[in-house]
């Protein structure tokens, strides 16, 4: 009994000494890991702030894109800090990096469509084929751009409806931007019956557009005879207007032309009688 008690005491003392040695050994690792976490967190926050401020100073660089890249910098730093902390406890960092790579590949394959939208969103924000407030048209969507996000673009249709378009559907198709340039051309054709003067019709067209203040003088409006047939001649009018009031201007000019021709027809009818 005494020998067993002695052996138990000796074993307990050996276990305590080993535990003390482990505590001393890993206490430095724990303290070092704790310091690494604090320093890494502060460094990631500062680098994120500096990256955002630096990118924001670049003229024309989108704020959404600046936040995305600065946030990516922060998470990369935090991942590196986490790997360093695990290395403090003897974990093989090479295996960790390999596992992270495999996990990233698996996530990338699982979120292939989402990553495609993110890549398309980055390209849209960098190249700027359209901006917020511009009216665009593609084979799939038409409307005024409300917001450009990393995943999708929000639009408002001409009849006041909300539309959300994934960025990949906007990047892979031709885009018509009706608001990018300050002015737009409008073309209007009228048919002059056989026996009536095409030159007189041209003068009427020019008088109408010259009386409209929203029609631009540079480039100047022009008229020409576009085609001739047995039934008469087709006279075409071309003029330019500001993009923001192009629709209203074209409608008003069309209405004024209709009224002018009605007035002329009424005068001709009175002269006949």
Image (spheres, helix red, strand yellow):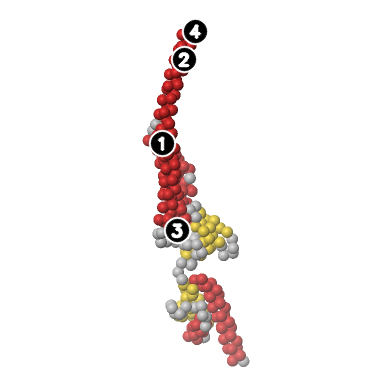
Q: CA distance from mark 4 to mark 3?
A: 81 Å
Residue density around tag 1, few if under 14, some if 14–19, many if 20 or more, within 10 Å? some
Label 3: how many Cα within 10 Å (few below 14, some 14–19, many 20+): some
Mark 3 / mark 1, whichever is N-terminal:
1
Q: Residue furthest top?
A: 1
Please tell me which of labels 2 and 1 falls first in the chain.
Answer: 2
**Residue at the spot of label 3:** 62
Residue at 59% across, 63% down? 160
Task: State the SS at label 2.
Answer: helix
- The disc label shown at residue 1, or none: 4
From mark 4 to mark 1, how far is it between C-alphas? 46 Å
**Residue drawn at x 49%, y 57% as measured from the top left:** 148
**Upstream in sequence: badge 4 or badge 1:** 4
156 lies above or below 203: above
- Give the distance between the C-alpha atoms of the residues marked 2 and 4, in whole angstroms: 12 Å
Disc with the residue nearer the chain's start (4 vs 3) = 4
**Residue marked by disc 1:** 32
Residue 122 in picture, x, y percent from top left: 44, 54
Disc 2 and disc 3: Cα gap in Å?
A: 71 Å
Q: Which residue is mark 2?
A: 9
Q: Residues within 10 Å of mark 4 (few under 14, many from 20)?
A: few
**Of 82 and 175, which appears nearest the observer?**
82
- The answer to which of 51 and 178 lies nearer the viewer is 51
Labels 4 & 1 near each other (Cβ < 8 A): no
């Amino acid at each position: 009994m005494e020998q067993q008690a002695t052996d138990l005491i000796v074993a307990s003392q050996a276990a305590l000494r080993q535990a003390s040695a482990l505590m001393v050994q890993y206490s430095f690792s724990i303290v070092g890991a704790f310091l690494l976490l604090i320093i890494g967190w502060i460094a990631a926050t500062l680098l994120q702030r500096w990256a955002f401020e630096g990118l924001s100073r670049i003229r024309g660089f989108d704020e959404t894109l600046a936040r995305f890249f600065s946030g990516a910098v922060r998470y990369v730093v935090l991942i590196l800090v986490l790997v360093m902390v695990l290395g403090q406890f003897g974990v093989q960092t090479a295996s960790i990096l390999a596992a992270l790579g495999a996990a990233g590949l698996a996530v990338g394959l699982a979120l292939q469509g989402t990553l495609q939208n993110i890549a398309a969103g980055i390209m849209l924000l960098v190249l700027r084929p359209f901006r917020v407030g511009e009216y665009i048209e593609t084979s799939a969507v038409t409307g005024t751009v409300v917001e450009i996000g990393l995943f999708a673009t929000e639009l408002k249709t001409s009849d006041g409806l909300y539309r959300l378009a994934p960025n990949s559907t906007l990047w892979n198709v031709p885009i018509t931007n009706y608001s990018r340039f300050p002015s737009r051309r409008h073309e209007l054709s009228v048919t002059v019956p056989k026996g009536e003067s095409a030159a007189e019709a041209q003068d009427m067209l020019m008088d109408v557009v010259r009386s409209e203040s929203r029609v631009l003088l540079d480039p100047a409006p022009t008229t020409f005879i576009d085609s001739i047939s047995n039934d008469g001649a087709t006279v075409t009018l071309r003029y330019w207007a500001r993009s923001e009031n192009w629709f209203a201007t074209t409608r008003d000019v069309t209405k004024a032309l209709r009224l002018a021709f009605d007035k002329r027809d009424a005068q001709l009818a009175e002269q006949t009688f």
